[in-house]
Amino acid sequence: MKRKKTSNIKAKPALPAAERQTAKDDSEMTALALQRGNLSPAMQAYFQKCQDKLGFIPNVLAAYAFDSAKLEAFAAMYNDLMLAPSGLSKLEREMIAVAVSSQNRCYYCLTAHGAAVRQYSGQPILGEHMVMNYRAARLDKRQRAMLDFSVKLTAEPWAVEEPDREALRRAGFSDRDIWDIAAVAGFFNMSNRVASATDMRPNSVYHAQAR
Amino acid sequence: MKRKKTSNIKAKPALPAAERQTAKDDSEMTALALQRGNLSPAMQAYFQKCQDKLGFIPNVLAAYAFDSAKLEAFAAMYNDLMLAPSGLSKLEREMIAVAVSSQNRCYYCLTAHGAAVRQYSGQPILGEHMVMNYRAARLDKRQRAMLDFSVKLTAEPWAVEEPDREALRRAGFSDRDIWDIAAVAGFFNMSNRVASATDMRPNSVYHAQAR
Amino acid sequence: MKRKKTSNIKAKPALPAAERQTAKDDSEMTALALQRGNLSPAMQAYFQKCQDKLGFIPNVLAAYAFDSAKLEAFAAMYNDLMLAPSGLSKLEREMIAVAVSSQNRCYYCLTAHGAAVRQYSGQPILGEHMVMNYRAARLDKRQRAMLDFSVKLTAEPWAVEEPDREALRRAGFSDRDIWDIAAVAGFFNMSNRVASATDMRPNSVYHAQAR
Amino acid sequence: MKRKKTSNIKAKPALPAAERQTAKDDSEMTALALQRGNLSPAMQAYFQKCQDKLGFIPNVLAAYAFDSAKLEAFAAMYNDLMLAPSGLSKLEREMIAVAVSSQNRCYYCLTAHGAAVRQYSGQPILGEHMVMNYRAARLDKRQRAMLDFSVKLTAEPWAVEEPDREALRRAGFSDRDIWDIAAVAGFFNMSNRVASATDMRPNSVYHAQAR
Amino acid sequence: MKRKKTSNIKAKPALPAAERQTAKDDSEMTALALQRGNLSPAMQAYFQKCQDKLGFIPNVLAAYAFDSAKLEAFAAMYNDLMLAPSGLSKLEREMIAVAVSSQNRCYYCLTAHGAAVRQYSGQPILGEHMVMNYRAARLDKRQRAMLDFSVKLTAEPWAVEEPDREALRRAGFSDRDIWDIAAVAGFFNMSNRVASATDMRPNSVYHAQAR
Amino acid sequence: MKRKKTSNIKAKPALPAAERQTAKDDSEMTALALQRGNLSPAMQAYFQKCQDKLGFIPNVLAAYAFDSAKLEAFAAMYNDLMLAPSGLSKLEREMIAVAVSSQNRCYYCLTAHGAAVRQYSGQPILGEHMVMNYRAARLDKRQRAMLDFSVKLTAEPWAVEEPDREALRRAGFSDRDIWDIAAVAGFFNMSNRVASATDMRPNSVYHAQAR
């Protein structure tokens, strides 16, 4: 499998054997040979903000950076979905992200968003549950209904019908909440596939976060 | 199945029995009770442009219109993916849209983008092939490889690996093209799920277009 | 893919590009090189009746015409199932045909019987629903139960049991009706496979019928 | 599970516990309450011939006997497919029948046609292989290709394409043989579903035949 | 497919064609070339006991005999599971074995344990039901619940949850019984895979037992 | 979901909210109400050895401790498979354990054996790869072939045949190695199902090990 660098952000220092795999994920972030494009001022500022706040640029953003317009569209949708006001908490949106990514077995999203679940919840095991099998988590009815809907929507979207929406309403979700569940689950069905199609690799820093 | 109007754009005239089903799709565009929000000037202009150019607002846009920011993010990503310069023709992007939607059995997207394939290609049967089973179309190697990749990415994203990318390269696609194929296939995996989750109904006008 | 003519009924006139694909479906109706056999007088009369009434010989009949006995057996079973008196209307039988063919993604049957649903119902969209995802149609309980049974019988016949029959009885079907539903669903599970195995192509005339 | 007699051919004598299950299969042949219809003279003669030659009426025929026209159509197609001249031996056609029925887990057809494979081949274990997993049989390339095609056509008919037909041609099959393989595999995909839909029970005599 | 003898217990006499396949199963018991190891005295005694009681060494034991420790571990677990005191009868444990093996289509286990069901029950047809489709057997609620649980645990273990355990409790099973059902179903999910991975062949004597 | 304690080893101290879920996994190790049985001296010594060496008793062993004979059989097989001399390294056997458990989405085994992969390899990310999608790991051909075989054997054991064994031989595995791969993959197909059937919970200590 010939791998090419998407961009060339980091120098590769000499490393002990065990850390080399990690380092590779940080320098060769997809299997596609795409050169970084010229970022718009807004996107330059966004990258700077990531660097300041997180200490790194998430590889998914770096991967989109070959085309500033595509990056901007992705970031706008992502930030609206995951951070804007919603009847779903930010943790709940991350839980959907990980349960969907587990169904699709997406290495990138399970790593990056598994870390987010650990961080938001303060419960490292909750992140593991979402990664491994959300049914193993001891969830309340609301969150269980939310994930059952999201995973069914992922696995057999053609079979989602009114009784599925009714189950969400019975669990306390409004119609607006249902939209948000669908939109987050849908978004990760997109991202999982872009990541799998390009063999996108998560920044190695995620793995140890919030354990 | 209780259906609520997403918005109330059109009056419902008395109709012969056979046309009532059609009319319902136009007036009750999703199963969620969401009120139209205040659109930003940019989105008002976008809707006006749709009305002028197409003669109607695609229901997917009307469905997103409960929240101007979400509509804007969706429209920006959609327009970049489907209309911006790419190694894939607009027809090819629509073919991916329909083949993916067929795998996911999405009524909304099959209807709206099936019409687009018929229009762009001038071959009504090509639209039917994409809807029914893309393998039945007599495609050249390039387009067949493109759809094989898109449908595998839809059905089992976890199994897409370097040999799948190599097959696209052998069929003449650049790494940038591979990104675009993945991004379009990914996008419709999102849209199919938002549409199925909300029982989104396509504007009835699509059905007869370009037959 | 080397295609051979099953028979040689029609001359191929010079055609604009967009119509060539259509024409091919009419002249090369399967991927198998089989010569038309000598038809029995009954079958000759049957073909003449098709020509008189429909204006063409359905390609499935032309495909079976390499052997008059096989054609006769197929036509006898088909006509009994789809046209003989039954508790199911002719439209309902065609709806089963298309919903089953959609599960099996059969290009031939979706095209030919999708047209029949459009014609019998006078509702073009109903045909589209059956082709794309029967769950998207707004059906009454009876027809929904009928299609749920047919599609389960198609997808996992080993799991059909007494509760499935009871659901049909509760929806108003008699035991004789249950037989008819099973027989029509079974028949198209056969026809779908003969068509897929031979790459059978539908007469192009179907595509525009009753739109 | 309420079971009704399809017809009332046999008296039920007092039986030791272990034989009661068997007897029930012989007297209550489907889960549908259908009265035997008036058989045409041809069908009466056919039943007599079964009785004379086999010593019993196969339950599938008795099940169809509620309607003489349906019985006639079924018998005509069955006899043409399984007994008429073909490039496939009768044993090979029965092997297809059982391998397809195994994929569909059809109790009736596995029992009746498993017995036929044992009888035609004189190899009881070959019948068991077809019932349990045809891949476990030590077949020559021709028969293996024939069953691979038949089982793929059963499990995912939408994916059968020219390379599958080419594999049959390379194994020595003519285009006419391919039709026959498809037609037999298709037929049992129909029969399996009629049997499963009606809980059809095989005559108990099959179980011990040719062991 | 090149087959090698696992060991060399039996001479191969000249045989009529129909019996040769059978004989091969007895002499070439797996596809792996493994030499019989030195059996511990306990295992020698165990083999002697098999020979005395059954008249043959089950091929699964002969297959494990390349390593006495592995054989001993396998035999200890097998004998505890299938023969030790339990709320499940020995027949019920064999029924689980066969229903699981049918889901996994394992030729070895279906043959050997199908014979055991026939023997323990005195009902040859019950063995056939377990092999072909356990849903076709007329079981009481207890045994049906037991097999439904076992087969779901086989097909989608990730989805087994408290409601599945509750269904067993409602059918009269204790928590200890639930363990035993899970353990037997689990064991055959192991054995099925060892047998399939090595193309393990059942002793031909099983086929005719207790018909 | 009513949960009962399998046994009562640990006192439950007052804990901050975030640690309560963890503690619960340690005290209520399965969903079955089974009392600890009298352990044989050998098993008492084995538990003591676990306590001394690991600092805890793995919950799977505690779960089996309701019956000393079952525990002994399980431990004997486990220790032979995972620790005895083999052409597979201990790490490789753990990699198989986790890749199989990922296919089956088994929370217990992914947690316990994911930790083992991290420990044996000294590469935390390798453990994550095995848990999330083994195809994302950058493996050499030998280990990739080993996992491809194991996961195919897990997902569709009926389809494993000589070409699959040949692929292992080409990757450098002996026939004895093939047995070991099959036996380890088989064993975790058993353990995964016992764990899922009983909702077995891993000791919370595993989660943070070797990160």
Image (cartoon, coloured by chain):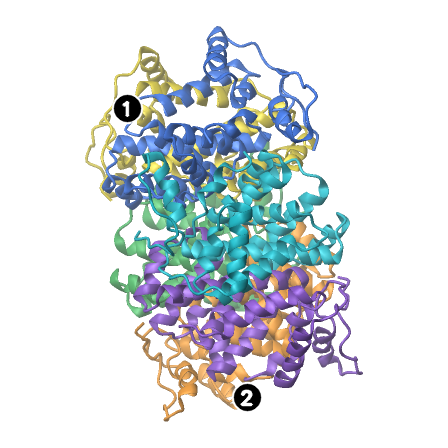
Chain colours: A orange, B green, C yellow, D blue, E cyan, F purple
In the picture of the structure, the residue carrying the numbered disc 2 is A53
Name the chain letter of the residue that bears numbered label 2: A
Say left or right for D132 vs D33: left
Q: Is residue F183 above or below residue A89?
A: above
On the image, the x and y values in percent for residue C68 come to 31, 18
The amino acid pointed to by label 2 is: Lys
Q: Is residue D49 above or below residue D191?
A: above
For disc 2, the neighbor class at 10 Å (few under 14, some 14 to 19, many from 20) is: few
Q: Is residue D128 above or below residue A165?
A: above
- Report if the CB atoms under discs 1 and 2 are less than 8 Å apart: no
Front-lying residue, B53 or C30: C30
In the picture of the structure, the residue carrying the numbered disc 1 is C66
Name the chain letter of the residue that bears numbered label 1: C
Front-lying residue, F198 or F180: F180
Front-lying residue, B180 or B164: B164
Mark 1 and mark 2: Cα distance apart in space: 74 Å
The amino acid pointed to by label 1 is: Phe
Say left or right for E196 vs E20: right
Residue at x 64% of width, y 36% of height: C164
